[in-house]
């Protein structure tokens, strides 16, 4: 629904207000904007009359934000920043489009980033911005076009498509495996077990799957797969790691299976986007590309890049 005209002040009024609020001075704001002091004062007064709200306390030659002004300047500053960013992006890429992608850190670094040159080659003119998001968020409040989500298919306010499922194995350094000489699932409980905060019950599920008591499982805790992988490489313990994210470590021998007993995760990876942006061309191109890329990899078709 379109906002009433009176609640859409001109940029000149808003920039004058923001500069005065930031500098705490009409004189400084006027100098920054290359205007006269009287011009800045008139713009701020016009904004206050438009909103019917006093934005500054005026005390002799000084100004101080009112409580309403404090709140309003935060919102205005954020809106001006978004407009500036959009303008810069359009200027840098007038014939394509900008796509902001929320990624999971290790997935983004190890799987997505090596494949992005292929997407950009297929879609010249599209600019990709990557931001890290560890948990679901509200697309209405976060300026992101599409996200990679690991979990259940239950993102409110978004559409989603299954990207890939995940198989994990207990992996560790060769030295640690040789030292403990694992033979059966219960033997892993004698070694340090590494845990991921986002999957607190993974080891319990793995042990239960392989008919091993799962009570009282303890160990080091990590918040990202990247650090968990490095800890396992360093010999700190055994970690349940996704096969598709540790291909290089397995090939080089930095990691080895503690036991060849995989487990498919209950959750899966999804690509998620806001419904109202579904037809945005860069988003549609990225969605089709990443789903094809994942399908080719999981079905054994050679991919454009290695992980």
Image: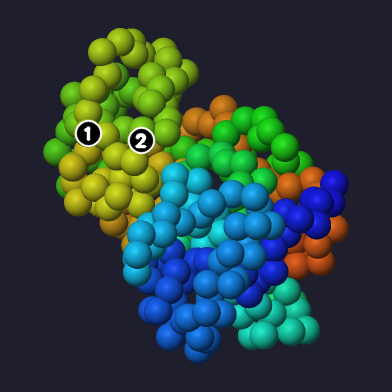
- Helix, strand or loop for disc 2: strand
According to the picture, the residue beneath numbered tag 2 turns out to be 196
Q: Is residue 96 left or right of residue 89?
A: right
Residue at figure coordinates x 34%, y 41% from the top left: 223
Q: Is residue 159 left or right of residue 305?
A: right
Q: Which mark is residue 84?
A: none
Q: Tell me residue 237's x, y (percent).
A: 22, 38
Q: Residue furthest left?
A: 179
Gap between marks 2 and 1 measured at Cα: 9 Å
**116 shown above or below 150:** below
**288 shown above or below 211:** below
Q: Is residue 109 left or right of residue 25?
A: right
**293 shown above or below 147:** below
**89 shown above or below 217:** below
Q: Is residue 9 left or right of residue 60?
A: right
**How dense is the environment of label 2, judged by Cα within 10 Å: few (below 14), some, or many (20 and up)?**
many
- Helix, strand or loop for disc 1: loop
- CB-based contact (under 8 Å), mark 2 and mark 1: no
**How dense is the environment of label 1, judged by Cα within 10 Å: few (below 14), some, or many (20 and up)?**
some
Residue at figure coordinates x 30%, y 10% from the top left: 215
Q: Quadrant of residue 247?
A: bottom left
Q: Tell me residue 227's x, y (percent).
A: 30, 50
Residue at figure coordinates x 40%, y 22% from the top left: 201
According to the picture, the residue beneath numbered tag 1 turns out to be 220
Q: Tell me residue 32's x, y (percent).
A: 44, 83
Between 178 and 104, the residue placed more toward the observer is: 104
Between 133 and 187, the residue placed more toward the observer is: 133
Q: Is residue 104 visible?
A: no
Residue at figure coordinates x 56%, y 39% from the top left: 136
Between 61 and 141, the residue placed more toward the observer is: 61
Q: Is residue 180 visible?
A: yes
Q: Tell me residue 73's x, y (percent).
A: 50, 57
């Amino acid at each position: 629904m379109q906002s009433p005209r009176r609640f859409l002040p001109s940029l000149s009024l808003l920039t004058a207000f923001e500069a005065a609020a930031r500098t705490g001075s009409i004189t400084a704001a006027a100098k920054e904007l290359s205007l006269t002091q009287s011009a800045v004062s008139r713009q701020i007064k016009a904004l206050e009359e438009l909103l019917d709200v006093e934005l500054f306390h005026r005390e002799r030659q000084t100004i101080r934000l009112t409580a309403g002004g404090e709140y309003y300047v935060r919102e205005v500053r954020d809106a001006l920043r978004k407009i500036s960013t959009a303008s810069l992006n359009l200027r840098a890429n007038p014939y394509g489009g900008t796509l902001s992608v929320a990624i999971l850190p290790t997935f983004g670094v190890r799987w997505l980033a090596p494949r992005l040159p292929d997407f950009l080659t297929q879609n010249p003119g599209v600019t990709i911005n990557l931001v890290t998001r560890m948990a679901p968020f509200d697309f209405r409040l976060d300026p992101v076009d599409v996200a990679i989500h690991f979990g259940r298919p239950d993102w409110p306010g978004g559409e989603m498509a299954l990207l890939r499922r995940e198989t994990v194995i207990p992996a560790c350094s060769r030295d640690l495996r040789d030292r403990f000489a694992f033979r059966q699932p219960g033997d892993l409980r004698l070694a340090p077990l590494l845990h991921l905060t986002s999957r607190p019950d993974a080891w319990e599920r793995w042990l239960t799957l392989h008919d091993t008591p799962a009570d009282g499982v303890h160990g080091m805790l990590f918040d990202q797969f990247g650090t968990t992988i490095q800890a396992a490489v360093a010999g700190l313990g055994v970690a349940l790691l996704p096969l598709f994210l540790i291909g290089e470590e397995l090939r080089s021998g930095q990691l080895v299976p503690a036991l060849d007993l995989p487990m498919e995760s209950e959750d899966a990876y999804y690509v998620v986007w806001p419904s109202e942006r579904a037809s945005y061309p860069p988003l549609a191109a990225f969605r089709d590309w990443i789903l094809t890329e994942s399908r080719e990899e999981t079905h054994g078709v050679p991919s454009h890049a290695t992980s």
